[in-house]
Image (cartoon, grey):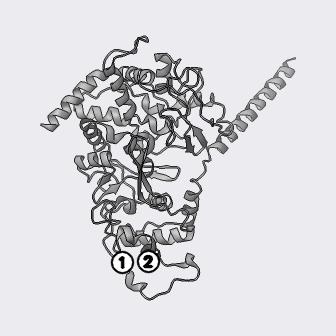
Amino acid sequence: MMAAFRLTAGAVLLSLAAMPVLAADKGVPDAAAIERGRYLATAGDCIACHSVPGGKPMAGGLSLATPLGAIVATNITPSKTHGIGNYTLKQFSDAVRHGVRADGANLYPAMPYTAYAKVTDEDTAALYDYFMHGVAAVDAAPAQTTDLPFPFNIRLSMAGWNMLFLDKKPFVADTAKSMEWNRGAYLAQGLAHCTTCHTPRNALMAEQLSKELGGADLGTWHAPNITSDINSGVGGWSQQELVDYLRTGRTANKAQAAGPMAEAIDHSLKHLSDADLHAIAHYVKSVPAIRDKADTQSVTQWGKAGDELASIRGVPLPQNLNKMSGAQLYDAQCASCHQARGEGSFDGSLPPLFHNSVTGRSNSNNLVMAILDGVERQDGRGAHAGHLMPAFRQTLSDEQIVTLGNYVQKMYGNPAIKVTAEQVTTLRNGGAPSNLIGLARAGIIVGVLVLLALLLWWRGRRRKQA
């Protein structure tokens, strides 16, 4: 019965998605049209980037860390002085789907227009209705503006990037696939922009679509492999387990959301319909498998309950607390919540550390980031819902985090995966810097030198002819 309902709902939504192309701007839409646009904006997680915690929705101002520098989200309320209130439907569509503002300037792909390009004309029009009539106007500009280093401060540089990497074609349904698969693909590739985070990028920061959902670093956090591989991805998850994770951020004995994924769940995914969550899960489980070499078994099957309490009983702490053992650090900082043997809390709200994808994966960044910044959740309306795990950034030194992280990996995760001092220092300081700025500047220098050489050659030839 539920499967039939999901397919029926998917059929209705896809039929809506196939309706006519962008029409001219019209008058005030009815409440149903605005509500439809609100749902789509929620699927697109617009509020997460375009609102600061405790601020007014869609008013901008949030500073988004990228390898090229901070990009400040703009005001996208219908303010006619500081927002998008003067945008026509076509201008709105060009910004959302093609990364071009109303003034002709290019947006940076931190705004996932490369994914939103998949959004149909009908859904784009519904989004426009919502932003123009369902969002309160805020007549104020963000306190900061984006100021990237040369040459990326020249927005025109993005025009060349778009020519190389932007596919402007909206989503086209695959008639050989089910309605549920198509609805999931439309959402995952488009508004939900799963590939934006979970797909690795090349040297020019474009997605490597041949490795779709194969996992990628996001500055400090790691967006894991979520392909259908049974070891590295979600091939061993049931569709219902994926749906539960997308709705709550937790699946028993497998994973729990933190960092950017927790934000995506709180602001977006948990508000989607059951049919749409099932469609996304159905699609994700169909993505071709990609396996990480280090994953010799499922990332959710590593480790078991255990402790080394006997080794520290009666042993005094060292005078230099940086020299505490992993067992001492775990007992002091972790055991009160995760239990002495790593079993997690009795009610299941705090996960066990074994049979946990965070400790089982070949990339230990998320373990380090959970220790540094903790795990916090929002209530989906912009209010803080509390910490599931406290941050130890101010409590533990880099050396202590290395010791603790390696103890957790040895006891409860994949023991072959290590936490290193360089890794912890880099993550504490915001992630590894990008070499793209240097490459771009070097490319400009080479281009100028080639142009000068051609000019000198041309002048020499003219002189010989004279």
Q: Pick the residue in front: 386 or 446.
A: 386
Determine the secondary structure under disc 1: loop
Amino acid on which the number 1 mark rests in the picture? Asp
Check if mark 1's residue and mark 2's residue have beta carbons within 8 Å.
yes
Which residue is located at x 29 percent, y 35 percent? 184
Q: Position of residue 164 (x, y in %)?
A: 53, 31
Which residue is located at x 38 percent, y 50 percent? 225
Up/down of 381 relative to 325, above or below: above
Q: Where is residue 258 in the image (x, y as percent from the top left)?
A: 41, 53
Which residue is located at x 34 percent, y 14 percent? 20
Amino acid on which the number 2 mark rests in the picture? Ala
Determine the secondary structure under disc 2: helix
Quadrant occupied by the N terminus: top left
Identify residue for label 2: 327
Question: Does any portion of residue 190 appear in the rendered image?
Answer: no
Q: Position of residue 93 (x, y in %)?
A: 46, 21
**How many numbered discs, if any?**
2
Left or right: 120 in relation to 368: left
| Rendered image: mark on residue 410 | none
Identify residue for label 1: 307
| Residue 462 sits in quarter | top right
Q: Where is residue 171 in the image (x, y as percent from the top left)?
A: 36, 27
| Residue 189 sits in quarter | top left
Disc 1 crowd rating (10 Å Cα; few below 14, some 14-19, many 20+) is some
- Return the disc, 1 or 2, that comes first in the chain's sequence: 1
Mark-to-mark CA distance, 1 and 2: 8 Å
Toward the left, the furthest residue is 1
Up/down of 186 relative to 405, above or below: above
Quadrant occupied by the C terminus: top right
